[in-house]
């Protein structure tokens, strides 16, 4: 769950978030919204108790404490109160400085649930781009041989070759999508079929086409005109220059993590956007697990420990929708397409009956591409 800039700060100060912990850089996990701040009855009850506490010289609880829902933010403030219980300060400024130093220390202490990352590092992962987290991971140089068989690159080459064979352009549908003829030819080449797949009737049947089209437009390899898509001079050069294809992989990798909207093609709740925001943390999970094959439940369980608020999303939709979103968006639509994970085929692969038995493992490309600093 994310707290809005104008919401009350979860630390319980009574100030708006933007004027409190957000402004001061104090990073603490946010509370549940089970008792919503917009619930006037709840707020009235809380206000009445605060008035009573002030008149009777009693400690004033935070909103969540009052309703018996102590959260990480409340616990952090409770720890601080215990820290200073036997201390005295000469001024409010001195107390503020001590609090800021205390929170800075807390924010930069490794957390087991974050696999050794600090709160500051996790905050940077969520809010900054891949290139702004070089204290956690950097990207290594690759050669064309490293990326030539990656699915996203194979799809890009197929896409542009089909355009070239059709005088460099093809008509779009009235909705701006690739036509049936293109889609069927694309799937035929991708899967090495002998005949056109007649069950493919639109671009909606092949989400890979949409993704690759966006990546190639971003790379300026194709132009989307009003009625047609056209390959550019830069796009033609890609097909004859292996170094350019390697550059396409790098650009697409960064674009997909930092700018592409993972929810675009799926009807998942907005709360699932955290899966894209924390993609680098998920890659760290893969790194920590090493070469051992693992199933989705093992992978997602580790991820969910760091983000327990996802359970609230599941409860809201009466399903395990967050795990489904994680598998589709992070594992299949990102890691598989960019060659970072592969399906592990073991001795008993013919006995696999359901998704729970399906296992994944990191590829050689994963090890070559990512240089971990922690």
Image: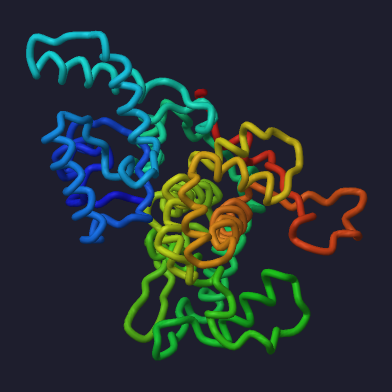
Q: Nearer the viewer, residue 363 or 73?
A: 73
Snapshot quadrant of residue 216: bottom left
In the image, residue 3 lies at what x, y percent? Answer: 29, 49
Residue 239 can be seen, yes or no: no
In the image, residue 334 lies at what x, y percent? Answer: 55, 54
Residue 200 can be seen, yes or no: yes
In the image, residue 283 lies at what x, y percent? Answer: 55, 40
The correct choice, above or below, for 60 with respect to 157 in the image is above
Q: Nearer the viewer, residue 261 or 26?
A: 26
Q: How many numbered marks appear?
A: 0
In the picture, measured across the screen, residue 325 lies left or right of residue 342, that is: left
Question: Which residue sits at x=73%, y=35%?
Answer: 291
The correct choice, above or below, for 130 with respect to 88 in the image is below
Q: Nearer the viewer, residue 136 or 294?
A: 294
In the image, residue 56 lies at what x, y percent? Answer: 15, 32
Q: How is the image coloured?
A: rainbow
Question: Which residue sits at x=39%, y=65%?
Answer: 217
Question: Which residue sits at x=43%, y=71%?
Answer: 231
In the picture, measured across the screen, residue 272 lies left or right of residue 19, that is: right
Snapshot quadrant of residue 329: bottom right
In the picture, measured across the screen, residue 30 lies left or right of residue 154, that is: left
């Amino acid at each position: 769950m994310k707290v809005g800039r104008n919401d009350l700060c979860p630390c319980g100060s009574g100030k708006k978030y933007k004027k409190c912990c957000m402004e001061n850089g104090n990073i603490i996990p946010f509370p549940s919204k089970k008792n919503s701040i917009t619930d006037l009855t709840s707020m009235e009850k809380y206000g009445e108790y605060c008035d009573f506490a002030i008149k009777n010289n009693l400690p004033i609880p935070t909103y969540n404490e009052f309703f018996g829902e102590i959260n990480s933010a409340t616990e952090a403030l409770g720890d601080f109160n215990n820290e200073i219980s036997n201390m005295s300060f000469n001024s409010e400024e001195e107390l503020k400085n001590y609090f800021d130093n205390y929170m800075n220390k807390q924010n930069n202490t490794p957390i087991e649930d974050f696999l050794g990352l600090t709160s500051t590092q996790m905050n940077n992962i969520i809010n900054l781009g891949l290139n702004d987290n070089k204290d956690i991971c950097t990207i290594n140089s690759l050669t064309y041989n490293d990326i030539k068989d990656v699915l996203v690159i194979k799809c890009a080459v197929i896409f542009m070759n089909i355009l070239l064979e059709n005088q460099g352009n093809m008509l779009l549908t009235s909705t701006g999508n690739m036509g049936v003829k293109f889609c069927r030819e694309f799937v035929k080449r991708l899967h090495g079929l002998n005949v056109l797949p007649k069950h493919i009737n639109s671009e909606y049947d092949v989400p890979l086409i949409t993704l690759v089209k966006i990546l190639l437009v971003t790379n300026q390899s194709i132009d989307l005109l009003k009625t047609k898509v056209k390959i550019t001079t830069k796009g033609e050069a890609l097909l004859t220059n292996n170094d350019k294809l390697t550059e396409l992989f790098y650009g697409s990798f960064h674009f997909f993590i930092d700018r592409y909207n993972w929810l675009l093609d799926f009807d998942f709740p907005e709360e699932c956007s955290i899966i894209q925001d924390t993609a680098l943390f998920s890659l760290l999970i893969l790194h920590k697990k090493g070469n051992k094959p693992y199933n989705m439940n093992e992978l997602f369980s580790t991820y969910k420990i760091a983000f327990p608020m996802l359970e609230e999303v599941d409860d809201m939709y009466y399903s395990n929708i967050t795990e489904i979103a994680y598998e589709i968006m992070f594992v299949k639509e990102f890691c598989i397409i960019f060659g970072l994970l592969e399906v592990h085929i073991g001795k008993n692969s013919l006995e696999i009956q359901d998704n729970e038995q399906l296992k994944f493992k990191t590829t050689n490309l994963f090890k070559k591409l990512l240089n971990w600093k922690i």
